[in-house]
Image (cartoon, rainbow, N blue to C red):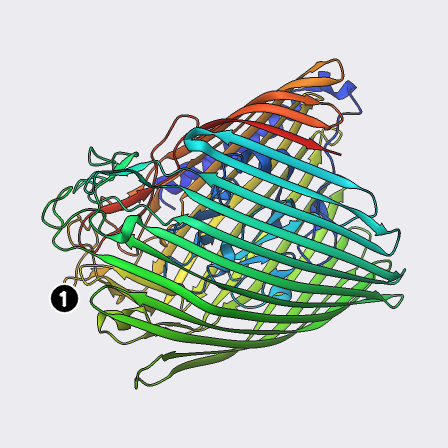
């Protein structure tokens, strides 16, 4: 193990020790017996279970942390590095985020790209990258499941799952609303209201979201002020819960989304050759564009789902039927400047539009699950998936429309047995058949087809050492289906194909609650090996987007999640993850950047040999921290809430260079306010990106050292109420 690896692991151990010592060194607090942490219930195994009893490394985010992260109108990228092991980035603005867990993800920016992290919203998989950008509003909880989840959730979950669960209809009347206003006229309004229409028979919940930011970035080439940077995001959801009898429930969910704003802002030569530091070419409030039409982005989508549960007594049947559709496009000045003018040396202009049309996704899941009253429990089921959509890329000099189709089906089962009062063993098996095809519309080019069938499985043992401390071990195997990438057809190159990747993962962990449940401290150590990992060789002087398979990929690491209820008025949380990832393929070579300093050895063709490099966008470590302190005043309280993260070395591409990486990025937020103790209302001031950090989030490397960065500092006020 390298010195750096040992240092990171020591840092993780130091964090663990700090949380433990803090708890053990606070005997004076033990007298406050009523001060305990609330239970956290998750559905990591498609059942409602206490997070402390699940043999999976899972983190849950809800309540004030979610409210604070999205106060300034951010999209799902706000969750990046806020959970140990989770990283999210995008070169497609708010429309197509890319997720990474335990260092494993996919940097491909194509609208047909697959990812090894599955996003699930209200029990429905969002497979396409645009669907993964579904707005986050009126959410009860976000769960991050780390490691392969192939048995219960299927293919393309080799890294894990990010799962969003909306607030559901209830018989009791419930309503909440939040409004915020801040810098650049950033405004949000989120509300949900619901209750019984017919007591014990029909309940509803309606939710809405509106987010706005003014354009604030000047285009100094066209001399247009406030040309870009803003957005309008609107979303709504209606849920109807029918309970015709005590054994049956039917949940109907209809939702819609409309986005009109600015795509990613690319900035030419903000990296100086030989350095990854942002240089003087960067100005957050201006760009120098002669193309891209100010980088517009529009997307609209709707979805419908129906979940039926029927309890037969001893077993429950669940059916989930869903349909999603969306369309839209993004356009950008990809080179980030003006060829021959600047900033810096730009050899040629690049103006590209990518659009997604007529996406139709249909999914059907049906499963039968036993109750959990006895020592033996089980669930079996089947799954069907079909999607059909068009992707159009217009590079100005050439244009192509590709029709992508994907059909998959699966059968699965899982069983658990409580061998002794302390020991529980769980195992599962799934078979998936996955077929994809791509055709070029209005062309005689041959159809490209790929297919594969694989078995996924998991086996775990969970042992309760004491009532408050448990250990577990888990082995899991999963796979990501084969993928077709046709974007290079626009640039007069053939489509590329990546064969299925498989992952074998092992982890051991512990779950603990200490100091009379004032402290919740969970941790895991893991290692995994991928065979035929799918990577995207993006950029290089030829501006390629090429799918490739490496021979192997290997990784190991740790992650910790901690909460500490110090007193009734002070809550601390902390998390840490360390990932060591490595590409294992002595012959794998990729194209390199046009103007940067590559540190990998090169082959005779000038391509970089990437054997031993870390995976792209795999942070070496993530450290996050939150603190909330309140001071009682009458029937209310003054409070302060702050949240921070720090992110270790993150390489952006398959090859390593001195420019395209980030080190030590950090960001924080602060919220100060007054709240009624019963939660009836709250008024506060807030700041996101409090210190106005400029963090490199990604790069475009084919004709200059272009980069894109994080969101600006937003300072504002918020008002919320609930009943």
- Whether residue 278 appears in this view of the structure is yes
Pick the residue in front: 285 or 417. Answer: 285
Asked if 388 appears above or below 212 in the picture, the reply is below
User: Where residue 394 sits: x, y (%)?
Assistant: 28, 65
Q: Is residue 168 visible?
A: no
- Residue 260, how many percent across, how many down? 44, 50
> Which sits in the foreground, 249 or 352?
352
Q: Residue furthest top?
A: 633
Q: Position of residue 313 (x, y in %)?
A: 89, 66
Residue at the limit of the structure toward the left, as seen here: 340
Instruction: Look at the picture and state if 393 lies above or below 513.
Output: below
Tell me the quarter of the picture where residue 630 sits.
Answer: top right
The count of marks equals 1
Q: Residue at x 47, y 59 (%)?
A: 130
Picture residue at 22% right of the left edge, 40% below the top: 270
SS for tag 1? loop
Which residue shows up at 34% across the image and 62% down it?
354
Q: Is residue 366 left or right of residue 149?
A: right
Q: Residues within 10 Å of mark 1 (few under 14, many from 20)?
A: few
Q: Is residue 93 above or below residue 428?
A: above
State which quarter of the image contains the C terminus.
Answer: top right
Instruction: Say which residue label 1 marks.
Output: 605
């Amino acid at each position: 193990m390298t010195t750096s690896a040992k240092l990171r692991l020591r840092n993780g151990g130091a964090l663990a020790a700090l949380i433990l010592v803090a708890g053990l060194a606070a005997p004076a607090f033990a007298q406050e017996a009523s001060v305990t942490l609330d239970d956290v219930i998750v559905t990591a195994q498609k059942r409602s279970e206490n997070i402390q009893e699940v043999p999976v490394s899972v983190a849950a985010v809800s309540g004030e942390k979610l409210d604070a992260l999205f106060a300034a109108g951010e999209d799902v990228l706000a969750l990046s590095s806020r959970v140990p092991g989770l990283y999210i980035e995008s070169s497609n603005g708010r429309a197509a985020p890319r997720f990474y867990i335990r260092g494993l993800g996919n940097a491909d920016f194509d609208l047909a790209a697959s990812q090894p992290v599955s996003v699930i919203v209200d029990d429905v998989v969002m497979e396409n990258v645009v669907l993964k950008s579904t707005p986050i509003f009126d959410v009860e909880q976000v769960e991050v499941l780390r490691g392969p989840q192939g048995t219960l959730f299927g293919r393309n979950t080799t890294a894990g799952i990010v799962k969003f669960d909306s607030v559901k209809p209830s018989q009791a009347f419930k309503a909440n609303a939040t409004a915020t206003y801040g810098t650049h006229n950033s405004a949000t309004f989120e509300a949900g209201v619901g209750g019984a229409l017919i007591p014990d028979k029909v309940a509803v919940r309606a939710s809405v979201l509106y987010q706005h930011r003014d354009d604030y970035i000047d285009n100094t080439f066209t001399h247009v002020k406030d040309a870009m940077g803003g957005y309008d995001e609107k979303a709504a959801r209606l849920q109807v819960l029918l309970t015709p009898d005590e054994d049956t429930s039917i949940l109907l969910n209809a939702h819609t989304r409309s986005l009109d704003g600015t795509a990613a802002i690319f900035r030419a030569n903000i990296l100086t050759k030989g350095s990854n530091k942002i240089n003087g070419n960067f100005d957050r409030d201006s760009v120098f564009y002669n193309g891209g039409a100010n980088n517009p982005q529009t997307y609209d989508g709707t979805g419908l789902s129906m979940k039926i549960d029927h309890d037969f007594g001893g077993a429950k049947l669940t059916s989930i039927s869903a349909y999603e559709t969306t369309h839209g496009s993004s356009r950008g000045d990809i080179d980030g400047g003006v060829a021959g003018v600047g900033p810096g040396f730009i050899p040629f202009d690049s103006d590209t539009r990518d659009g997604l049309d007529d996406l139709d996704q249909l999914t059907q899941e049906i499963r039968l699950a036993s109750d959990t009253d006895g020592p033996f429990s089980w669930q079996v089921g089947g799954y069907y998936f079909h999607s059909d959509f068009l992707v159009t890329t217009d590079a100005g000099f050439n244009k192509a429309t590709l029709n992508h189709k994907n059909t998959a089906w699966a059968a699965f089962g899982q069983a658990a047995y409580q061998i002794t009062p302390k020991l529980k063993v769980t195992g599962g098996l799934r078979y998936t058949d996955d077929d994809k095809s791509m055709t070029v519309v209005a062309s005689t080019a041959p159809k490209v087809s790929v297919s594969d069938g694989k078995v996924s499985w998991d086996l775990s043992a969970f042992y309760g050492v004491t009532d408050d401390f448990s250990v577990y071990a888990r082995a899991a195997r999963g796979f990501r289906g084969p993928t077709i990438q046709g974007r290079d057809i626009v640039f007069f190159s053939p489509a590329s194909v990546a064969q299925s990747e498989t992952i074998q993962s092992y982890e051991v962990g512990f779950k603990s609650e200490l100091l009379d449940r004032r402290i919740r401290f969970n941790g895991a150590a893991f290692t995994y090996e991928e065979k035929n990992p799918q990577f995207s060789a993006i950029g290089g002087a030829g501006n390629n987007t090429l799918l490739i398979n490496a021979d192997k990929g290997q990784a190991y690491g740790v992650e910790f999640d901690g909460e500490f209820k110090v007193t009734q008025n002070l809550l601390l949380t902390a998390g840490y993850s360390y990932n060591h990832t490595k590409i294992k393929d002595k012959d794998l070579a990729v194209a390199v950047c046009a103007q940067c300093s590559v540190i990998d050895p090169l082959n005779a063709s000038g391509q970089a040999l990437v054997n031993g490099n870390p995976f792209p966008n795999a942070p070496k470590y993530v450290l996050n921290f939150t603190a909330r302190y309140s001071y009682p005043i009458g029937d209310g309280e003054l409070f302060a809430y702050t949240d921070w993260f720090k992110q270790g070395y993150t390489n952006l591409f398959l090859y390593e260079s001195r420019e395209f990486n980030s080190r030590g990025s950090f960001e924080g937020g602060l919220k100060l306010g007054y709240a009624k103790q019963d939660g009836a209302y709250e008024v506060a001031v807030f700041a996101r990106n409090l210190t106005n950090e400029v963090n490199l989030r990604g790069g475009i490397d084919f004709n200059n050292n272009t980069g894109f960065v994080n969101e600006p500092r937003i300072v504002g006020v918020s008002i919320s109420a609930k009943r």
